[in-house]
Image: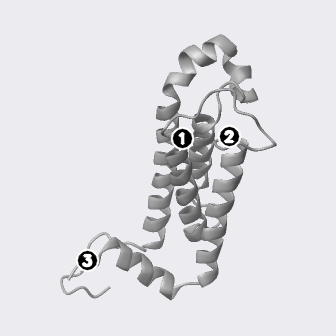
């Protein structure tokens, strides 16, 4: 009988160090709080957002933080970090206020930023989230957490 993804993950984590789960939860929580504050998704005394929040930014932030936490929980040193890093940067650039982001302002300038980059921010964010998910998949495959084929009688 085939095990579901949730059962496979809980079985994997039960056999491994519980500190990794705690690390993943802490990273997810910190990522959500830090990136939400830096990108001014919510009002805060540190940063003021100059463009209004759109409906996709908060769910994207939640997905980013969740994926970052999962990646931190399963990551081994120097594996898949390039994809995860690129995914994190792309997610940040997509979620951040385009006119507040000094890097984007330097690259595009004010008018071009709002005309050309702002409309593709959801796509940049989706690409970042995809790269994070791909890095998690790569980590899982390297560790054989999720078997490619389940044996006929469910013996894993």
Q: Which image quadrant for residue 21?
A: bottom right
Instruction: Give the answer, above or below, for where 72 lies relative to 6.
Output: above
| Residue 83 in picture, x, y percent from top left | 55, 49
| Residue 149 in picture, x, y percent from top left | 26, 72
Q: CA distance from mark 3 to mark 1?
A: 38 Å
| Residue 105 in picture, x, y percent from top left | 71, 22
Which of label 2 and label 3 is nearer to you?
A: 2
- Kind of element beneath mark 1: helix
Residue density around tag 2, few if under 14, some if 14–19, many if 20 or more, within 10 Å: many
Q: CA distance from mark 1 to mark 2?
A: 10 Å
Identify the residue at the far right of this view. 46
| Label 1 with label 2: CB-CB less than 8 Å | yes
Which of label 3 and label 1 is nearer to you?
A: 1
Nearer the N terminus, badge 3 or badge 1? 1
The residue pinned by badge 3 equals 150
The residue pinned by badge 2 equals 39
The residue pinned by badge 1 equals 57
Query: Quarter holding the N terminus?
Result: bottom left
Instruction: Give the answer, above or below, for where 137 lies relative to 15.
Output: above
Query: Quarter holding the C terminus?
Result: bottom left
């Amino acid at each position: 009988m085939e095990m579901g993804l949730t059962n496979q993950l809980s079985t994997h984590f039960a056999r491994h160090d519980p500190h990794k789960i705690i690390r993943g939860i802490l990273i997810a929580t910190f990522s959500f709080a830090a990136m939400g504050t830096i990108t001014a998704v919510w009002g805060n005394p540190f940063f003021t957002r100059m463009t209004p929040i759109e409906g996709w930014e908060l769910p994207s932030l939640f997905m980013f933080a969740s994926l970052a936490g999962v990646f931190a929980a399963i990551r081994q040193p120097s594996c898949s970090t390039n994809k995860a890093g690129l995914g994190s940067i792309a997610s940040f650039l997509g979620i951040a206020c385009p006119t507040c982001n000094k890097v984007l302002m330097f690259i595009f300038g004010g008018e071009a930023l709002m005309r050309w980059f702002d409309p593709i921010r959801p796509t940049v964010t989706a690409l970042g989230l995809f790269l994070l998910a791909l890095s998690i998949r790569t980590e899982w495959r390297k560790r054989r957490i999720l078997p490619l084929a389940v044996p006929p009688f469910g013996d894993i």
